[in-house]
Amino acid sequence: MSNHQVKNPAVIPTFTASETLAADLQRALVDITALSLVGKQVHWNLVGPNFRDLHLNLDEVVDIAREGSDELAERMRAINVFPDGRPGTIASQTTVPEAPEAAVITADAVDYIVSAINAVVTTLRDIHDAVDEADPSSSGILEDYTQRLEQQSWFLSAQNYSAN
């Protein structure tokens, strides 16, 4: 056994986020994390016509939100920002509307989840230009999740159209 201690070289990041960039990414993290939580809340309490399709579609939304929150948080760490995904932080800072507490009929669930997705997309779009200017690598993440969530908003909202 060797008596030599291995010392890791100091990690010197090539880029450190400004306070503004950190705050913008935190806003995105809060909202996309909240979307994953409310998506499951509605998923568990859904009732009514077209239950199964909507139940499964909500899982797709939750999966996108969970992937997005992980990708954002890991990007934050890569640029020397500590992400804050604690429940109290998410609850107090999100722009996502509060989810229904109990059973929710499918048509109302669609309206709710579309509004929740749109709240997240609004945040992503609001911060995009500033993030892009400060760190184009981070803005690419915002663009990807904006596109994916807008697609889900369209898929879901199409369920409540009628031929009036």
Image (spheres, rainbow, N blue to C red):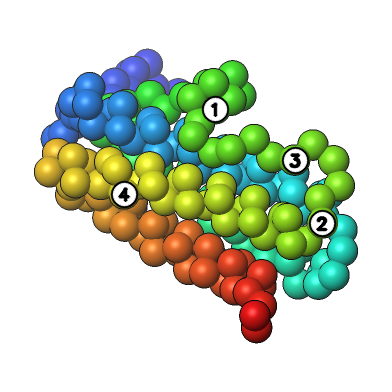
Element marked by disc 1 = helix
The disc placed on residue 125 is 4
Residue position marked by numbered label 1 in the rendering:
90
Sequence-earlier tag: 1 or 2: 1
Element marked by disc 3 = loop
Image quarter of residue 146: bottom left
In terms of secondary structure, where does tag 2 sit?
strand
Q: Quadrant of residue 99?
A: top right
Considering only order in the chain, which callout, 3 or 4, is on the residue closer to the N terminus?
3
The image shows residue 130 at horizontal and vertical percentages of: 18, 40
Which residue is the site of mark 3? 100
How far separated are the C-alphas under marks 3 and 2?
Answer: 10 Å
Left or right? Give the position of 73 relative to 75: right
Using the numbered discs, state the Cα–Cα distance from disc 1 to disc 2 in whole angstroms: 26 Å
Query: 102 or 41: nearer the eye?
Result: 102
Comparing labels 4 and 3, the label whose residue is closer to the camera: 3
Give the numbered dot on residue 105. Answer: 2
* Residue neighbourhood size for the residue with mark 3, other residues' Cα within 10 Å, grouped as few (<14), some (14–19), many (≥20): some
